[in-house]
Image (cartoon, rainbow, N blue to C red):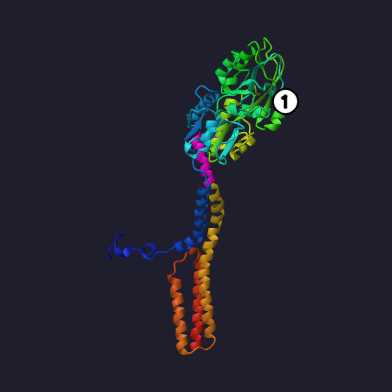
Amino acid sequence: MERERSPGSNNAKRPGPSYLGVKIPSVSWRDLWVGLGPILVLCVLAVFLVMHFLSPAPPRTLTMSGGPPGSTFSRVADRYKKILARSGITLKILDSRGSLENLQRLVEPKSGVDIALVQSGLPAPGDASDLVSLGSMFYEPVTIFYRNPKEISRLSELTGQRIAIAPEGSGARFLALALLKANEIQPGGPSKLLDLEGEAARAALLHRQADAIFLTGDSASGTTINEMLHTEGVRLFDFTQADAYVRRFPYLSKLLVPSGAFDLGENLPPAPVNLLAPTVELVARSELHPALCDLLIEAATEVHGHAGLFHTAAEFPNPTSSAYPISAEAARYYKTGSRSLAYRYLPFWLATLVNRALIVLVPLLVIVIPGLKLVPQLYSWRIKSRIHRRYGELMALERESLSAPSPERRAQLLERLQQIERSVIARRMPGAFADQLYILREHIEFVRDQLTRASG
């Protein structure tokens, strides 16, 4: 009786692909690399170029030069600080003596100051080519109070009198000297120029130690002007030549204050008054990050966008600037009126990350998507070129067989043909090209028959 064969016995094994011991390649990695290599190189190059020109992530800390403690500049800086903190930005505020010191810090590279409020029209104490403006934030009206039996209409009528024009180094003094010089009143002349401002200047006028005083900035608040208008014998100077001043000094603006603006009950001033006012600009270094530029203008809009005694609602901030070019990012913001989509709907840090990722991914997609479409064609071309190269060798052998070669030469040709066939068999080739490979082997056999018949 024939013994049953157990399923685990050797005789039960059936031959199959898993027992052939032959590894059938489906992909030629070398050929695939030849197709993908250029695409990868272009991607790496694109990433390098994008990272080279891409701005770094915005810093989390900014330094601002403010103003004297309790001043308008200082209060504005504090409001900026609270608004920026909502986006995770810390604003460090340095006290200063005002616009001139703020400008000096911006010009000095080692000061560490990134932004500052600066009165327009001030000369920069150094190279200001690296400074840009984020726009005008508010007016700083110039008010001149004087004692005189009758109203005066020109500053030249103050010749020979005592005039308080603020201390050395202040923006108020610079502006006062510029206006007086235009009326031929200069230091060393018959007029006595006093280094007084604020309360000291007011006290000098009230005690008849000064005949006229220049007040601007915090010294010329609405409350101060109201008190001075209620003081007997003190008049507010009306710049009847305001249009001429604005033409001569482009950084000045003409402000028309209607009657009763300071006191409706007593109708003060009793008639409309023309005032002059430089604007205060938010000035920054040119390397300020674009995302922070948008945040600062949004903060300025929240702080200065409401109506005031000297300006209408939404008049500030605006992209006017007298001495410094408007930042390209600020100009874009004023033109579009908003930040990018990501910054409007995402937290600041996340929007920054998304924007930077998009800047990197877009060039890559532009290269990768068309490149991936080319990879199969490049891969196919690579495989076919290898097969076609063998056809070239076969044609050369066949041509030589027609010239009646000697037996020794024919043997050499047959040996070469054998080498070609071995190399074709040994070459790793994807299964998709097997039909072309076997057709090539048929053609090899055809040439071999040609050589064999020639030898017979």
Residue 105: x %, y % from top left: 51, 35
Q: Position of residue 345 (x, y in %)?
A: 55, 33
Mark count: 1
Q: Relative to 380, is 178 above or below? A: above
**Toward the viewer: 321 or 110?**
110
Viewer can see residue 118: yes
User: Which residue is rendered at x = 45% and y = 75% of the image?
Assistant: 421
Visible residue check, residue 344 = no
Q: Quadrant of the N terminus?
A: bottom left
Amino acid type, callout 1: Gln
The residue positioned 69% from the left and 12% from the top of the image is 267
Residue closer to the observer: 95 or 388? 95
Tell me: residue 283, above or below residue 441. above
- State which region is magenta: 342-360
In the foreground, 117 or 123: 123
Viewer-proximal residue among 387 and 434: 387
**Residue 44, x across and y down, in percent:** 49, 54
Q: Is 318 included in the stretch rendered in magenta?
A: no
Q: Bin the neighbour count of mark 1 within 10 Å (Cα to Cα): few under 14, some 14-19, many 20 and up.
A: some
Q: Which residue is mark 1?
A: 241
Q: Position of residue 298 (x, y in %)?
A: 57, 31
Numbered disc 1: secondary structure: loop
